[in-house]
Image (cartoon, helix red, strand yellow):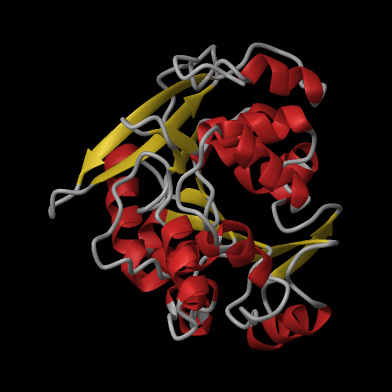
């Protein structure tokens, strides 16, 4: 397994080689924002090696249980200055005491980050939970968003359907003897792709506690475990099922829904999206729910159209 002292950006050359992406890797740095209530919001700021001070043009929000590094290969292929944010309760961002990981609650933190780390309206991209949060951001702060891209999520997805795989994966023990156990669990669920990619993802999404046990960085694993133990708990469903149609209807920027061929958005979901938002574009790409990992280069090519 990878050593804990390994630099979080040291995976980039291997990721570029795996995906046949040429050129020098971008400059990446971790930045943080102190929020008014004492929490911290963490993010990764990226810029081309030739212009390391370039302000972000694209901001990316990950799904439940992931973190900002899920976008690394997309950013490598995209070649644009970007900001990838760890949602509250994920990655290096603080957990919420109230465990309220729903779009209307999370959106103000993202608005604060955009005002702190960007200087122009963004191509705002959100996958899964991040897509619902992105819609809430675009609705509440239209001056910060020039285009909204929502990846493999609609407000109508049934949390008891295919999307329940997310909750099932994270439900279980809240700590582990080693990262190797987490890698094997991910592979058993068909997640992470190759063993090497799964190992990389687990390393970037977990931490070793002072007692030597390993835990996921995100709060969602603890919520999923609680929901599995107590059938009346609704925390996981709340994450997966948010009433975001009003947010999407209020967005003034152009909207694109990108679906994975094997993703969670069904044809019926897509039809409902089209009926409610007839001006929005829809695109289908090869891959599953986590398109940023299943098909990062193809996704980057599509995003580049909006990034120009």
How many marks the image carries: the answer is: 0
Vertical relation: 150 (above or below) 186: below
Residue 74 coordinates in the image, percent (x, y)? 66, 36
User: At x 67% / y 14%, what residue is drawn?
Assistant: 13
User: At x 27% / y 42%, what residue is drawn?
Assistant: 116
User: At x 53% / y 78%, what residue is drawn?
Assistant: 241
Q: Quadrant of residue 73?
A: top right
| Along the line of sight, the residue nearer the viewer: 118 or 98 | 98
Residue 72 in sight from this viewpoint: no
Residue 38 coordinates in the image, percent (x, y)? 14, 49
| Along the line of sight, the residue nearer the viewer: 122 or 6 | 6
Residue 41 falls left or right of residue 70? left
Residue 76 coordinates in the image, percent (x, y)? 65, 27
Residue 92 coordinates in the image, percent (x, y)? 36, 39
Identify the image quadrant of the N terminus.
top right
Residue 192 in sight from this viewpoint: yes
Residue 290 falls left or right of residue 218? right
Residue 269 falls left or right of residue 86? right
Identify the image quadrant of the C terminus.
top right
| Along the line of sight, the residue nearer the viewer: 178 or 113 | 178
User: At x 51% / y 36%, what residue is drawn?
Assistant: 177
Vertical relation: 102 (above or below) 134: below
């Amino acid at each position: 397994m990878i050593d804990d002292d390994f630099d979080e950006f040291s995976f980039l050359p291997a990721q570029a080689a795996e995906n046949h992406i040429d050129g020098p890797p971008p400059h990446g740095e971790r930045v943080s924002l102190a929020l008014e209530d004492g929490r911290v919001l963490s993010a990764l700021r990226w810029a081309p090696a030739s212009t390391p001070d370039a302000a972000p043009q694209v901001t990316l929000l990950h799904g439940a249980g992931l973190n900002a590094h899920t976008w690394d290969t997309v950013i490598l292929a995209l070649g644009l200055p970007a900001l990838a944010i760890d949602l509250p309760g994920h990655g290096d961002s603080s957990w919420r005491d109230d465990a309220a990981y729903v779009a209307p609650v999370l959106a103000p933190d993202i608005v604060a980050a955009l005002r702190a780390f960007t200087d122009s309206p963004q191509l705002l991209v959100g996958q899964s939970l991040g897509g619902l949060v992105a819609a809430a951001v675009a609705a509440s702060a239209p001056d910060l968003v020039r285009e909204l891209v929502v990846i493999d999520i609609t407000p109508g997805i049934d949390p008891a359907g295919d999307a329940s795989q997310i909750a099932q994966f994270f439900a279980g023990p809240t700590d582990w003897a080693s990262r190797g156990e987490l890698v094997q669990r991910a592979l058993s669920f068909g997640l992470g792709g190759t063993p090497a990619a799964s190992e990389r993802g687990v390393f970037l999404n977990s931490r070793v506690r002072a007692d030597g046990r390993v835990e996921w960085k995100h709060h969602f694993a603890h919520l999923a475990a609680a929901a599995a133990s107590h059938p009346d708990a609704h925390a996981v469903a709340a994450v997966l099922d948010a009433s975001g149609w009003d947010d999407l209807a209020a967005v003034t920027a152009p909207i694109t829904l990108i679906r994975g061929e094997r993703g969670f958005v069904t044809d019926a979901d897509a039809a409902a999206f089209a009926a409610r938002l007839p001006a929005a574009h829809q695109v289908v790409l090869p891959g599953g729910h986590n398109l940023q990992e299943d098909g990062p280069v193809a996704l980057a090519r599509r995003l580049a159209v909006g990034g120009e």
